[in-house]
Amino acid sequence: MSNSLPSPRWITFDSETSCALQARIAPERIVEFSNQRPLEYVLERPSTVVAMLPASEPNQSALAIFRWNSAPLPANEPENPPHMQVAGFLGLTDELVFEDDPQEKKGWWRWG
């Protein structure tokens, strides 16, 4: 029993690239999706996709690896909400107090 990896499947999005690959690779390994955009294809796949992209220099290319990452969703509330300070006549208006502007807490008997 051999543990060889399956040969890669080449997916193209235009006929020019497909024809160029068919001259070098077995045609059964090439699939052309001329009616779909590459990013749409990547976003619809749950598995890892490796893309070979043209580089700015001739005879060079770049590899891009797209894989899904399970990141936690952000919470609806900020982690450290700003503090509110009662102000105004009879405490009817509120002001935001930020951590950068610390104020010394005073007891209820000290006004001033």
Image (cartoon, rainbow, N blue to C red):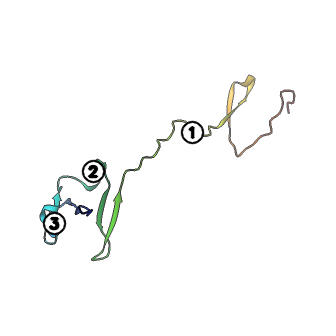
Amino acid type indicated by mark 3: Glu
3 and 2 marks in contact (CB < 8 Å): no
Residue 38's spot in the image, x, y percent?
Answer: 26, 56
For the residue pair 13 and 102, the one nearer the viewer reads as 13
Give residue 18's quadrant in the image: bottom left
Query: In this picture, is 59 found above or below 102?
Result: below
Residue 51's spot in the image, x, y percent?
Answer: 29, 62
Q: Disc 2 on helix, strand or loop?
A: helix
Along the horizontal axis of the image, is 28 left or right of 38?
left
User: Which residue sits at x=27%, y=51%?
Assistant: 40
Q: Residue furthest front?
A: 1
3 or 2: tag closer to the N-terminus? 3
For the residue pair 73 and 89, the one nearer the viewer reads as 73
- Crowding near pointer 1: few (<14 within 10 Å), some, many (20+)? few
Give residue 111's quadrant in the image: top right
- Crowding near pointer 2: few (<14 within 10 Å), some, many (20+)? few
Q: Which residue is mark 3?
A: 16
Residue 45's spot in the image, x, y percent?
Answer: 28, 49
Residue 106's spot in the image, x, y percent?
Answer: 83, 33
Along the horizontal axis of the image, is 41 left or right of 93?
left
Amino acid type indicated by mark 2: Glu
Q: Which residue is mark 2?
A: 40
Q: Which of the labelled discs sits on residue 78, or is there none?
A: 1
Q: Which quadrant: the C terminus?
A: top right
For the residue pair 93 and 60, the one nearer the viewer reads as 60
